[in-house]
Amino acid sequence: MTVSVSVRSYTHATTYVADNILKSLKDILLYSGLAPDKLAGDREVLLRGISRWIETGHLRTIVLEVYNPSSDALVGRWDIHITYEWTGGDGQFWTDTDAIRFAIKKAGVLPSTASYAVIVDLEENAPDVPGWSTTTFRSTAGFVAQQIGTTVEASGLSGGLSYYRTR
Amino acid sequence: MSVVARTFVSVPQRSASLTWELIVDLIAQDVDSPARRELAAIAGVACSCIADLALADDALVVHGAGPRLRVYALYGDDAIEGDESSESALSFVATDGDWRMSIPCLLDDLEWVQRSLKAVSNRVTARAVGQQLAEDEEQDKTSTGRIGAIAPFVVDRDSFFRR
């Protein structure tokens, strides 16, 4: 875990959280045994949307769905829930990659043939962002959510991680 | 070979994507150049390495027809303060001639980063943080040889060039 303190703005916080959400998604894929190449290829569009919707306060949750490309059925799912409790510019910014690694050890490696998609859950009236379109979540029937805790923190603007495992 | 260094402000002052855009502007000023297209193709992978703080102590190295260029990034408090940044334009085009680029990345990421780069570029490669480029190692060995066997001396090139 890396921790540092200085006077920082809300813009610094949104930049930090958005970049480190993408880093967290990459780490989840990597340590789960999946190739992050597609995520890297979509990085610009993903960052544009996540940054914009954190700025406007419309972003509730970033969801990484891992699914069977043949059946389209959910294989695994990771959620990063955003909390907007910005407390000012003298707090800590940190990202806990170790917590992600530990959670993946418990969740288990995913099939390397699986595909994945990044989907966001937004508040109503969120602004449109180029490159993003409307979709629906895959069914989580047969899965149960496990909370990990905060893994990205920027003075109260934070991302809390959870994952879904089969019952 | 002469060496030039630049240090860019990065997260959280700038996103990794904006940091990369400015690095590309530095090394391939002509927006219509083949180098620019090649660098655009690897943007996602490069940004991932920047977001992993891989450029904090290890340089992204570009070498072509001109001097060897070493690019670092500042993160956290150092990025916000920006006192150690050096982002001025170069007097040469780093991607002129038969140029090559080496991007540092975390050891755990090395396999997928190398694979991803190889799929779209034959000029850009990756190495693990803490690993020197072969050309740098060769120069260091040469330096040690000249000094002699009494007191072996190896230059910490990353610390030396970024200051």
Image (spheres, coloured by chain):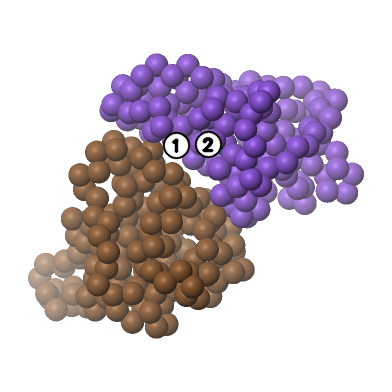
Chain colours: A purple, B brown
Q: Where is residue B21 in the image (x, y as percent from the top left)?
A: 43, 56
Query: What is the quadrant of the N terminus of chain A in the image?
Result: top left
Which residue is more in the foreground, B32 or B104?
Answer: B32
Image: A106 above or below B31: above
Q: Can residue A61 be seen in this view?
A: no
Q: Where is residue A48 in the image (x, y as percent from the top left)?
A: 56, 43
Q: Which mark is residue A51?
A: 2
Q: Which residue is under mark 1?
A: A15
| Amino acid identity at mark 1 | Thr
Q: Which chain carries label 2?
A: A
Q: Distance between the residues labelled 2 and 1?
A: 7 Å
Q: Where is residue A115 in the image (x, y as percent from the top left)?
A: 75, 48
Image: A118 above or below A70: above
Residue A165: quarter of image: top right
Q: Which of marks 2 and 1 is nearer the N terminus?
A: 1
Local secondary structure at mark 2: helix
